[in-house]
Protein backbone atom coordinates (compact mmCIF):
# COMPACT_ATOMS: atom_id res chain seq x y z
CA UNK A 1 0.00 0.00 0.00
CA UNK A 2 2.70 2.58 0.82
CA UNK A 3 4.36 1.85 -2.54
CA UNK A 4 1.10 2.43 -4.44
CA UNK A 5 0.50 5.66 -2.53
CA UNK A 6 3.99 6.88 -3.45
CA UNK A 7 3.35 6.12 -7.15
CA UNK A 8 0.09 8.10 -7.13
CA UNK A 9 1.83 11.03 -5.46
CA UNK A 10 4.61 11.10 -8.07
CA UNK A 11 2.05 10.95 -10.89
CA UNK A 12 0.15 13.90 -9.42
CA UNK A 13 3.35 15.94 -9.19
CA UNK A 14 4.08 15.28 -12.87
CA UNK A 15 0.75 16.72 -14.07
CA UNK A 16 1.66 20.45 -13.76
CA UNK A 17 4.73 20.00 -15.96
CA UNK A 18 2.57 18.47 -18.71
CA UNK A 19 0.05 21.31 -18.51
CA UNK A 20 2.85 23.91 -18.77
CA UNK A 21 3.55 23.15 -22.46
CA UNK A 22 3.09 26.31 -24.63
CA UNK A 23 -0.40 26.55 -26.07
CA UNK A 24 0.93 27.69 -29.45
CA UNK A 25 3.36 24.80 -29.90
CA UNK A 26 2.37 21.41 -31.26
CA UNK A 27 3.99 18.12 -30.29
CA UNK A 28 7.72 18.08 -30.96
CA UNK A 29 7.99 21.86 -30.80
CA UNK A 30 6.46 22.48 -34.25
CA UNK A 31 3.84 25.11 -34.95
CA UNK A 32 0.27 24.15 -35.87
CA UNK A 33 -0.99 24.34 -39.48
CA UNK A 34 -3.08 27.39 -38.51
CA UNK A 35 0.04 29.27 -37.33
CA UNK A 36 3.05 30.92 -38.93
CA UNK A 37 6.47 29.81 -37.70
CA UNK A 38 8.43 33.00 -37.01
CA UNK A 39 12.20 32.65 -36.60
CA UNK A 40 14.80 35.25 -35.64
CA UNK A 41 18.47 34.25 -35.76
CA UNK A 42 20.60 36.88 -34.01
CA UNK A 43 23.89 35.26 -35.13
CA UNK A 44 26.87 37.52 -34.24
CA UNK A 45 24.60 39.83 -32.23
CA UNK A 46 24.19 37.16 -29.56
CA UNK A 47 21.00 35.60 -28.28
CA UNK A 48 20.96 32.54 -30.52
CA UNK A 49 17.95 31.61 -32.64
CA UNK A 50 14.34 31.87 -31.45
CA UNK A 51 11.19 30.37 -32.92
CA UNK A 52 7.68 31.57 -32.10
CA UNK A 53 4.27 30.35 -33.31
CA UNK A 54 1.84 33.09 -34.36
CA UNK A 55 -1.81 32.29 -35.05
CA UNK A 56 -3.09 33.11 -38.53
CA UNK A 57 -1.24 34.83 -41.35
CA UNK A 58 -0.78 38.36 -42.65
CA UNK A 59 1.97 40.91 -43.35
CA UNK A 60 5.45 39.93 -42.19
CA UNK A 61 5.79 43.17 -40.22
CA UNK A 62 2.73 42.33 -38.11
CA UNK A 63 3.79 38.70 -37.64
CA UNK A 64 7.20 39.74 -36.31
CA UNK A 65 5.52 42.19 -33.94
CA UNK A 66 3.01 39.60 -32.72
CA UNK A 67 5.88 37.16 -32.14
CA UNK A 68 7.60 39.65 -29.84
CA UNK A 69 10.19 40.90 -32.34
CA UNK A 70 9.28 44.54 -33.05
CA UNK A 71 11.17 46.06 -35.98
CA UNK A 72 12.59 49.53 -36.53
CA UNK A 73 13.17 51.06 -39.97
CA UNK A 74 16.46 52.66 -40.89
CA UNK A 75 16.54 56.45 -40.36
CA UNK A 76 19.04 56.86 -43.21
CA UNK A 77 17.88 58.90 -46.24
CA UNK A 78 16.51 56.72 -49.01
CA UNK A 79 16.25 53.66 -46.74
CA UNK A 80 12.57 53.95 -45.84
CA UNK A 81 11.08 50.52 -45.19
CA UNK A 82 14.50 48.91 -44.77
CA UNK A 83 14.59 47.19 -41.36
CA UNK A 84 17.49 48.36 -39.23
CA UNK A 85 16.75 46.70 -35.88
CA UNK A 86 14.84 43.62 -34.75
CA UNK A 87 13.90 43.41 -31.07
CA UNK A 88 16.29 46.32 -30.43
CA UNK A 89 19.32 44.66 -32.06
CA UNK A 90 21.87 45.80 -33.05
CA UNK A 91 21.75 48.29 -30.20
CA UNK A 92 24.42 50.36 -31.93
CA UNK A 93 26.65 50.20 -34.96
CA UNK A 94 25.78 49.76 -38.65
CA UNK A 95 22.61 47.95 -39.60
CA UNK A 96 21.98 48.88 -43.24
CA UNK A 97 25.35 48.68 -44.98
CA UNK A 98 26.31 45.93 -47.42
CA UNK A 99 28.03 43.68 -44.90
CA UNK A 100 25.82 44.20 -41.83
CA UNK A 101 22.06 43.89 -42.13
CA UNK A 102 18.98 41.77 -41.43
CA UNK A 103 18.19 39.31 -44.25
CA UNK A 104 14.52 38.37 -44.69
CA UNK A 105 13.47 34.82 -45.57
CA UNK A 106 10.18 33.00 -46.08
CA UNK A 107 8.80 29.57 -47.00
CA UNK A 108 5.34 28.42 -48.12
CA UNK A 109 3.32 26.06 -45.91
CA UNK A 110 4.75 22.60 -45.44
CA UNK A 111 6.16 20.14 -42.94
CA UNK A 112 9.66 21.60 -43.32
CA UNK A 113 10.68 25.09 -44.53
CA UNK A 114 12.04 25.57 -48.04
CA UNK A 115 13.64 28.95 -47.48
CA UNK A 116 13.68 31.65 -50.17
CA UNK A 117 15.29 35.08 -49.86
CA UNK A 118 12.45 37.59 -49.79
CA UNK A 119 12.17 39.94 -52.75
CA UNK A 120 9.60 42.05 -50.87
CA UNK A 121 9.89 44.10 -47.68
CA UNK A 122 8.25 43.21 -44.37
CA UNK A 123 5.24 45.45 -45.05
CA UNK A 124 4.59 43.93 -48.50
CA UNK A 125 5.38 40.26 -47.82
CA UNK A 126 2.12 38.48 -46.91
CA UNK A 127 2.07 34.94 -45.54
CA UNK A 128 -0.61 32.25 -45.25
CA UNK A 129 -1.13 30.11 -42.14
CA UNK A 130 1.36 27.25 -42.05
CA UNK A 131 4.09 29.36 -43.64
CA UNK A 132 7.57 30.10 -42.30
CA UNK A 133 9.11 33.54 -41.80
CA UNK A 134 12.60 34.49 -40.65
CA UNK A 135 15.03 37.32 -40.05
CA UNK A 136 18.72 36.35 -40.00
CA UNK A 137 21.45 38.82 -39.05
CA UNK A 138 24.27 38.88 -41.61
CA UNK A 139 27.62 40.41 -40.82
CA UNK A 140 30.95 40.31 -42.65
CA UNK A 141 32.02 38.79 -45.96
CA UNK A 142 30.29 35.90 -47.68
CA UNK A 143 26.79 35.19 -48.93
CA UNK A 144 23.71 35.47 -46.78
CA UNK A 145 22.39 32.14 -45.56
CA UNK A 146 18.89 31.05 -44.44
CA UNK A 147 18.24 30.11 -40.82
CA UNK A 148 19.66 26.80 -39.71
CA UNK A 149 17.88 24.29 -37.53
CA UNK A 150 15.09 26.15 -35.78
CA UNK A 151 14.84 26.22 -32.01
CA UNK A 152 11.85 24.65 -30.19
CA UNK A 153 8.78 26.76 -30.89
CA UNK A 154 7.32 29.10 -28.28
CA UNK A 155 3.81 30.48 -28.04
CA UNK A 156 3.39 34.09 -29.12
CA UNK A 157 3.59 36.68 -26.32
CA UNK A 158 0.63 38.84 -25.38
CA UNK A 159 0.29 42.41 -26.67
CA UNK A 160 1.24 43.71 -23.20
CA UNK A 161 4.42 41.62 -23.22
CA UNK A 162 5.39 42.93 -26.65
CA UNK A 163 4.87 46.52 -25.50
CA UNK A 164 6.87 45.87 -22.32
CA UNK A 165 9.76 44.48 -24.39
CA UNK A 166 9.70 47.59 -26.60
CA UNK A 167 9.77 49.82 -23.50
CA UNK A 168 12.73 47.88 -22.12
CA UNK A 169 14.57 48.45 -25.39
CA UNK A 170 14.01 52.19 -25.11
CA UNK A 171 15.18 52.13 -21.49
CA UNK A 172 18.34 50.31 -22.56
CA UNK A 173 19.05 53.09 -25.04
CA UNK A 174 18.83 55.63 -22.20
CA UNK A 175 21.18 53.53 -20.10
CA UNK A 176 23.81 53.94 -22.79
CA UNK A 177 24.15 57.67 -22.02
CA UNK A 178 27.20 58.35 -19.76
CA UNK A 179 25.26 59.93 -16.89
CA UNK A 180 28.01 59.07 -14.40
CA UNK A 181 30.62 60.81 -16.52
CA UNK A 182 28.41 63.87 -16.85
CA UNK A 183 27.82 64.01 -13.10
CA UNK A 184 31.55 63.75 -12.51
CA UNK A 185 32.16 66.66 -14.88
CA UNK A 186 29.65 68.82 -13.01
CA UNK A 187 31.40 68.12 -9.71
CA UNK A 188 34.81 69.01 -11.16
CA UNK A 189 33.51 72.26 -12.67
CA UNK A 190 31.82 73.16 -9.39
CA UNK A 191 35.04 72.63 -7.47
CA UNK A 192 36.98 74.74 -9.95
CA UNK A 193 34.51 77.60 -9.50
CA UNK A 194 34.79 77.50 -5.69
CA UNK A 195 38.59 77.81 -5.59
CA UNK A 196 38.82 81.37 -7.07
CA UNK A 197 36.07 82.57 -4.72
CA UNK A 198 37.94 81.33 -1.69
CA UNK A 199 41.15 82.92 -2.93
CA UNK A 200 39.42 86.26 -3.40
CA UNK A 201 38.23 86.21 0.21
CA UNK A 202 41.65 85.36 1.67
Image (cartoon, helix red, strand yellow):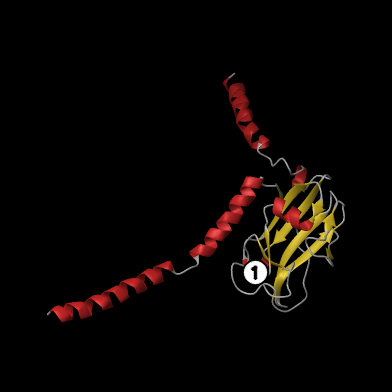
* Location of the N terminus (image quadrant): top right
Q: Position of residue 188 (x, y in %)?
A: 31, 75
Q: Which residue occupies the foreground of this view, 143 or 85? A: 85
Farthest residue to the left: give it.
202
x and y, in percent, of residue 53 in the image: 75, 48
Nearest the camera: 126 or 100?
126
- Residue 86 placement: quadrant: bottom right
Residue bearing mark 1? 44
Image location (x, y in percent) of residue 67 = 70, 51
Q: Position of residue 91 (x, y in %)?
A: 59, 67
| Count of labels in the image | 1
Q: Can you say whether 44 is above or below 15 in the image?
A: below
Q: Give me the residue at 71% from left, 59% from top.
A: 40
Front residue of 30 and 56: 56
Which quadrant of the rendered structure holds the C terminus? bottom left
**Relative vertical location of residue 122 with respect to residue 36 in this rendering, above or below:** below
* Left or right, 119 with reference to 4: right
Would you say 90 lies left or right of 38 here?
left
Can residue 23 be seen from the camera position used here? yes
Please tell me which residue is depicted at 31% across the width and 71% down the height of the picture: 187
| Residue 15 in the image: above or below residue 193 | above
Task: Examine the rendering and report whether any part of residue 150 can be seen.
Answer: no
Give the crowd class for mark 1: few <14, some 14-19, many >=20 residues within 10 Å.
few
Q: Residue at x 17, y 77 (%)?
A: 198
Give the residue at x 58% y 59%.
Answer: 169
Q: Secondary structure at mark 1?
A: helix
Q: Nearer the viewer, residue 194 or 105?
A: 194
Amino acid sequence: MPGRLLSLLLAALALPSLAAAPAGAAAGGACAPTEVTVVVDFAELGGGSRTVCVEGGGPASQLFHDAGFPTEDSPAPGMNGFVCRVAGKPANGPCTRGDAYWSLWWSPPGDEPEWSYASLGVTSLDLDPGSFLAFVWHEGDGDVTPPGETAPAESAPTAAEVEAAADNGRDDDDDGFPWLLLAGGVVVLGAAAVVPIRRARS
